[in-house]
Amino acid sequence: MTPSKARHACEACRSEHVTISDRSALHHGYFSTIHQWLPMISEKRLRDIQLSLEDASHDLLLLCMKLCTISLGNYPPSQHPLYSLTKSLSSTAENAGLASLRLIQSLVLLSIYELSHSIHPAAYLTIGRAARLVILMGWHDRDAQQLFKPADTWSLREEQRRTWWSIFILDRVINTETSGFPFATPEPSPDELLPVNDDDWGRGKSIPSQSLYTASFSSYAPLGCFARTCQAAHMLGKVINNRDCKKKSSQEAADLLTEAQSLHQALAALKLSIEQTAGYESGNDEYPLWSAISICVSAQALLYGSYGCPNAPGASSRARLALDTEMQGLSVEGLRVLASSTGPRLAQIPTQCPFMARCFYASATACAWFIREDREPEMLDALRQMVSSLKGLSRWGVAGEYLALLEQGGTLNLIDTEPITLGAYGIYGVYL
């Protein structure tokens, strides 16, 4: 299909599903929910009529925004007509060569929908497509060959950077549940910049950017919530790499254990920094920091799950080191804090950020281990809170999948029955 025909196809479908009178409600629905925890789209630029005419995939983006905010009704997430339509149109636009910011953002939203509703391997494949396009556009590295016209305004370049970081975040989150798969996005370049403060960007105010790799941050330009999320995703990627390398006997065990201890310290410092950010205790159900804290906690759970058991993969084929014992102690204590403190605290937040589902699941599996092992009553109360919180995320299919895994592992039975001895799922649950 030619670019012109692809554009007309997107426009025709958009006019059917998103009328002119619908746009205001669509913008409000999107920017008051999804945008709060993954702010990659500039509302100011989105509303610019002239700019919307210049990007052939603008109509596709509106359809994807609607997909992420509508109620699915009785449709299974993978079979919803709008999902099928946007998947088809995105492929049409991509095959027609309509590489642009809006096409990439459309793929990001599709991946969010797929991840949030546990549509796999589609989520992994979709974010891979978005990553390839971003790399083709040269947004991942300022020194990369630039095949397309560079951004001519600060606001456009910042939106490109935020889109790149959104792909990076989703790529790491999606790979949390898998093992040994390569990332679609490379590690940030040495001079990579973090997104600017979200409030200033939303107002269109030009301010300096902070570097990802720095010993200290300038007080002149405080980090925004989205920048914190990027930091957390960067740490999550390092934990995933450590976990995967741990399963390879060729990797030096002492080096991995030393790195694991460093990751433990870095994650603790990052979590504390996020919690000390102004407004963290606000209780706002869509407060932007919830995505940052959820990814940080997920990284901690993954790290502690890898080292909390002496029979974990990679440990039995070699002599045990003193570092093994130290890291196991840190991990067990970290899981105890996750189950008894961090999880219940997060459960008090009435957020709809789908990243939270992983935290609640990880905390629930840790609670189950302590209940089975030590019969601790406070862990039973915490487990009830985790299950209730997962049920509260029912708009996202991934929460139901985690509840099914808890039921499969016998964890849900612990709520209404006497604690039993440690089962086959142990401290890790199924995917922890």
Image: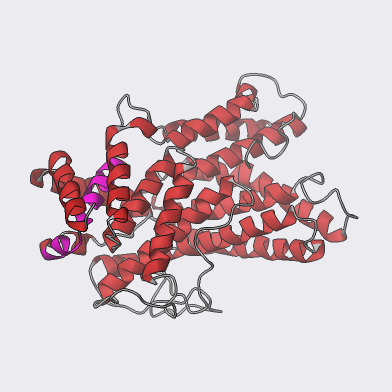
Q: Is residue 48 magenta?
A: no
Predominant secondary structure, magenta span: helix
**Looking at the picture, how far across and down is residue 349, in whole percent?**
43, 43
**Looking at the picture, how far across and down is residue 105, in whole percent?**
32, 56
**Looking at the picture, how far across and down is residue 147, in whole percent?**
34, 75
- The one nearer the camera, 185 or 162, is 185
Which residue occupies the extreme right position in the image?
Answer: 319
Q: Is residue 325 left or right of residue 37?
A: right
Residue 251 lies, with reference to residue 156, above or below; the image says: above
**Looking at the picture, how far across and down is residue 363, in whole percent?**
60, 41
Residue at 54% across, 55% down: 296
- The one nearer the camera, 328 or 383, is 328
Residue 47 lies, with reference to residue 151, above or below; the image says: above
Q: Is residue 66 magenta?
A: yes
Total labels drawn = 0
The structure's colour scheme is secondary structure
Residue 417 lies, with reference to residue 180, above or below; the image says: above
Determine if residue 224 is in view.
no
Q: In this view, does 342 lie to the left or right of 25?
A: right
Quadrant in the picture for residue 225: bottom left
Residue range highlighted in magenta: 50-67
Identify the image quadrant of the C terminus: top right
Q: Is residue 49 left or right of residue 154?
A: left
Which residue occupies the extreme front position in the image?
Answer: 1
- The one nearer the camera, 324 or 178, is 178
Quadrant in the picture for residue 413: top right
Determine if residue 342 is in view.
yes
Residue at 27% across, 47% down: 65
Which residue occupies the extreme left position in the image?
Answer: 21
